[in-house]
Image: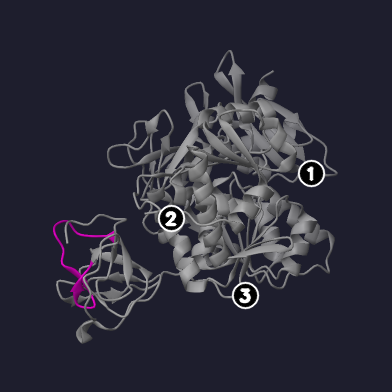
Amino acid sequence: MNVMMLLEMASQGFGDRVAFTNGDDSLTYQELFDAAGAAAAEIKKSGCDYVAMLDVSSLAMPVALFASAWAGVPYVPINYRLTGHEIKGLLARVEPCMLITESDRAKDFSGHDEVSVCTRDDFLATARNGDPLQEPWSMEQEDTGVLLFTSGTTGAPKAAVLRQKHLVSYILGSVEFMSAGEDDAALGCVPPYHIAGISAVISSVYSGRRMVQLPNFDAADWIALVNEEKITNAFVVPTMLARIVEAVADDPGMEMPSLKALAYGGGKMPLSVIERAMQLFPNADFTNAYGLTETSSTIAVLGPQDHRDAAASKDEAVRRRLVSVGRPLPGVEVEIRDEEGKPLPAGSRGEIYVRGEQVSGEYVGRGSLLDSAGWFPTRDAGSIDEEGFLFLEGRADDVIVRGGENMSPGEIEDLLLEHDAVADVAVVGVADEQWGEAVAAAIVLKDGHTGDIPALQAWVRDRMRSSRVPQLIEFWNELPYNETGKLLRREVKARLGS
Amino acid sequence: MAELKAGTRMKSAVCATEVMVIAAPAGSLDITCGGAAMVGSAEEAGGGSVDAAFAEGTLLGKRYVNQAGDLELLCVKPGDGSLALDGETLVLKEAKALPSSD
């Protein structure tokens, strides 16, 4: 298996369709296939063991992704928001490599023997004009396709290994070939070093859906591009959707008639944002996608009908599904287990385990974390309701242990978010002499509200066991999130604990 | 044909069809396209023509399955012959309707 086979199918089936658009430039599927072949020849010639991409989204990104697969060399996207020191640390783990980056950065890496630097423009120009690699790509399914450094919210980044079999299985299990209409267009604004940014590129190719790249997200630019390019499908992370909702709400005349489907994922979506978004875009199909780097992207989806059913329901248990991540994809199994690894019944909280062809669960230097039956412990905490809907409850490591009692920060956060004064909240455990850990909350207030600690404590005490009442509450202007909307709980914990 | 594993690519000996194995039962399998045994993608095709009894053709990107459901092939290049296992013509697997999530 090889993702190149998927691109070859696309180039045969609809080679003249535009595959990717960036500003005024574009590539058809046939042009992308030809460019991948020529770039693969360059990669082979360079003798590198890895292709690293340190850049925003550009046409060079899909070319490099497929060319690496053709050349049989892992593709390694690197987060361009990291510091120079961090980037060099990651590059040292993938030497010798070809590094594709923007021209401003290229000089930072020149003169280094093990890193052969190529600017984005040079890479693309060579790929567009060169001769293709004569050798066919390998169909060995164990070949490494992508090495992806995880975001490292809990320590040093780990390099997740995604083999060709994982990437191809994900696409074959979740996308129907040529299922997109000729006029369909997806807006890609997730960073290219994020698993969702990579899987979106391969999914678009296989479905035949043109992808328009937006390298730097800004709500106004996003809205303008939707209308200019008649975007039909888009994927956003929760913080992006929150900004789009704000921008649209501020401008009541604003319309995006072409937008048929809006998918989101990558972090916890606040109920208020998704409810508002559904009101503002009544004609759009909403899909919530949950996945991890280690699972080659999406493993569960809350589909459009699930959204509508939940929003329209008077039953609290059904309504609550609006904040669930839906049900597993076909071919993917999900279980909730306790600390001993024993499966738990519906409704119980525990750690989320996942199994399926697309699940890698492997890191460089650590091997596979899959158990003998193929299950991957995600370290995400969650529960599954009677109808099979999966709810996320934060990271398994985030569990607060107060006086021997385990509690999930998520349930306390959800309750506090229902309070009128609370716009955003993070609950963590902080060291406590008496209890081992104490419950602490950082709260962002809604405009026009003042912080009333006793009232907020009473709000929790009246609705939950008294052990859940935050002993410490601070009011902050904002909570720390990474750029894809993941709460940096470690930072909250450090600040509240100091 | 020897035992097949997921990911194996094969081509027709008598038409342009190429497939990738998505799932296959254990054991040696007699998989044909256009009535002739399929060969590995790197092998030389023997020549010959499509048997009229197996000439429905294959469609790019479609999956073909046997009645038992344990053999599944993905057409990666279309051709004039139809796929069969032990003489039983494989049928088109219905597409799933899944929301686009990325």
User: Residue A188: image x %, image y %?
Assistant: 64, 57
Q: Residues within 10 Å of mark 3 (few under 14, many from 20)?
A: few
Q: Amino acid at mark 3?
A: Asp
On what subunit does the disc labeled 2 rest?
Answer: A
Q: Are marks 3 and 1 on the same chain?
A: yes
For discs 3 and 2, the disc positioned in front in the rendered view: 2
Q: In the displayed image of the protein, which residue is found farthest to the top?
A: A433
Circles 3 and 1 in contact, beta carbons < 8 Å: no
User: Residue A293: image x %, image y %?
Assistant: 50, 43
Does A104 sit left or right of A165 as displayed?
A: right
User: For residue A380: magenta?
Assistant: no
For discs 3 and 1, the disc positioned in front in the rendered view: 3
* SS category of the residue bearing label 2: loop
User: Residue A296: image x %, image y %?
Assistant: 46, 48
Which quadrant, please, contains the N terminus of chain A?
A: bottom left
Q: Above or below — where is A467 with respect to A354?
A: above
Label 3 vs 2, first from the N-terminus: 2
* SS category of the residue bearing label 1: loop
Q: Nearer the viewer, residue B29 or A436?
A: B29
**Distance in Å between CA atoms under marks 2 and 1:** 61 Å
Circles 3 and 2 in contact, beta carbons < 8 Å: no
Does A27 sit left or right of A36 as displayed?
A: right
Picture residue at 76% right of the left edge, 52% below the top = A218
**Distance in Å between CA atoms under marks 3 and 2:** 34 Å
Q: Amino acid at mark 1?
A: Lys
* Mark 1, residue position: A446
Q: Amino acid at mark 2?
A: Gln
* Mark 2, residue position: A134
